[in-house]
Amino acid sequence: MNIKNVIIVAGLILIPFRSFGQQSNVNLDYNPQKNTEGLIPFSAAVNSPEVHDDNTVTFRLRAPNAQKVVLPSGAIHTANGLGREALPFTKGEDGIWTLTIGPLKPDMYAYHFNVDGVQIADPGNTYAAFTAMPPYSELIIHGDGPAYYDARNVPHGTVTRHVYHSEVTNGERELYV
């Protein structure tokens, strides 16, 4: 048997295994920021943010040498009537700063911390908000049912790729519908 036949046979044997990697269904109960197992994700120094059952949120930051940590005014404040003032964290004896707010309305929020005048994303949060610089973290508060951004187990249609010549750029462009 030559090398070409070996590659073809190996390919035919391995192709069916690709089908096992597909997601069987959409988990509508997926809520990564609700700490139901008491675990600190990805070896972060602290668990932040932690969304509680009553939609209150606890932010934590390990910064033992910091003098002042605040949650600056932003979308969380505006959507939930928290005023325009920055919300101060409280420093614990272990050097962990803590702030609990809410209950918050179900939505997606972009936020950041201000540590001694420096704006930082939440280092304990693995979700980054898609905003311009400076960096923001993303907080997701789930409601009773699926939100507009949640995947639903319904037919989703098809995506078509169109390639066309643009007179403006004098080149080929593509778009997806």
Image: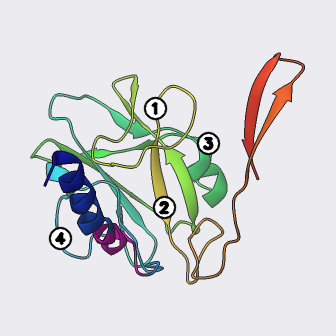
Q: Is residue 88 left or right of residue 153?
A: left
Position of 82 with respect to 41 (left or right) is: right
Residue 127 image point, x, y percent: 40, 49
Q: Residue at x 53, y 66 (%)?
A: 104
Q: Picture quarter containing residue 32?
A: bottom left
Residue type, numbered disc 4: Gly
72 or 33: nearer the viewer: 33
In-image side of 26 versus 76 (left or right): left
Residue tagged 3: 84
Q: Is residue 101 magenta?
A: no
Secondary element type, mark 3: loop
| x then y, percent, for residue 39 | 16, 65
Q: Which mark is residue 38?
A: 4
Q: Toward the viewer: 47 or 168?
A: 168
Task: Name the magenta segment's main secondary structure.
Answer: helix
| Mark linked to residue 118 | none
- Magenta residues? 16-24
Residue beneath disc 1: 135
Residue 140 x, y percent position in the rendering: 48, 61
Tally of numbered tags: 4
Mark 2 lies on a secondary structure that is strand
Residue position for label 2:
140
What whole-number distance in Å separates the C-alpha atoms at marks 4 and 1? 27 Å
Type of amino acid at the residue the image marks with label 2: Ile
- Give the mark nearer the N terminus: 1 vs 3: 3
- Mark 1, other Cα within 10 Å: few <14 / some 14–19 / many ≥20: some
When asked about the image quadrant of residue 23, the answer is bottom left
Cα–Cα span, label 2 and label 3: 21 Å
Task: Tell me which numbered mark, 2 or 3, is placed earlier along the sequence.
Answer: 3
In this rendering, which labeled residue sits more in front, label 2 or label 3? Answer: 2
Q: Which amino acid type is shown beneath numbered disc 1?
A: Pro
